[in-house]
Image (tube, rainbow, N blue to C red):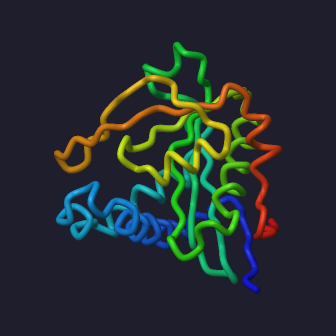
Amino acid sequence: MAEYCLRPAALAEARAIAEINAMAWRETYVGLMPAEILAGIDLDDWTRRWLARIGSDESGQAVFVAFEDGVPVGFARCNRQTNPKLVPLGFDGEIASIYLLRRVQRQGLGRGLMARLAEHLMCIGCASAAVWVLRDAAKARGFYEALGATPLGVEGVWEVEGVVLPDLAYGWRDIRMLAAGAGVRKASPIG
């Protein structure tokens, strides 16, 4: 049986996170995003971005990494809410990203990462949180709904390399439930 661990990201893991990010995009966004964008991901550029994110606590940012048998297989990032459409609605926390490699999905790691994000957001004074999800990403929407998120009726767009993709906001009015109830079911992360 695999051993799982969730913990805050270290700067030395920026490249591994960039690689997971790219692989997860290629697994998740096939058919939703043009193939040339997915094929053209610049890992050096993405590594620089992750170094900046991991090394910053701006806006209360935190990055967590999921490991399977000591190998990074996913990550998640959160911060205080920055979206001008969601701040006036009372959502003070933001789930900025969460990705797991397909082979480790449905093991409880996503729930565990979401719990860690909610715990961090509560530690920096947030009571609620929102996340943007691609409108056509049914699995991702189902994941958030299973964790108690509700559609907020707010639409937006995600622009990637000149391609505009419609997205929707989902939210949790009370993230205490997310922190307490999103614990890992099958996996038992430590750390």
Between 85 and 177, the one lying in front of the other is 177
Residue 59 in view: no
Q: Is residue 36 left or right of residue 76?
A: left
Which corner quadrant holds the C terminus? Answer: bottom right
Which corner quadrant holds the N terminus? Answer: bottom right
Please tell me how many numbered marks the rendered image carries: 0
Between 95 and 185, the one lying in front of the other is 185
Residue at image location 69% in from the left, 83% down from the top: 69
Residue 67 position in % (x across, y down): 66, 73
| 69 versus 15 height, above or below | below
Q: Is residue 107 left or right of residue 72?
A: right
Residue at image location 71% in from the left, 62% down from the top: 7
Residue 5 position in % (x across, y down): 74, 70
Residue at image location 55% in from the left, 47% down from the top: 56
| 78 versus 19 height, above or below | above
Q: Is residue 49 left or right of residue 94?
A: left
| 68 versus 65 height, above or below | below
Picture quadrant where residue 129 is located: top right
Residue at image location 49% in from the left, 51% down from the top: 140
Picture quadrant where residue 110 is located: bottom right
Residue 164 in view: yes
Picture quadrant where residue 58 is located: top right
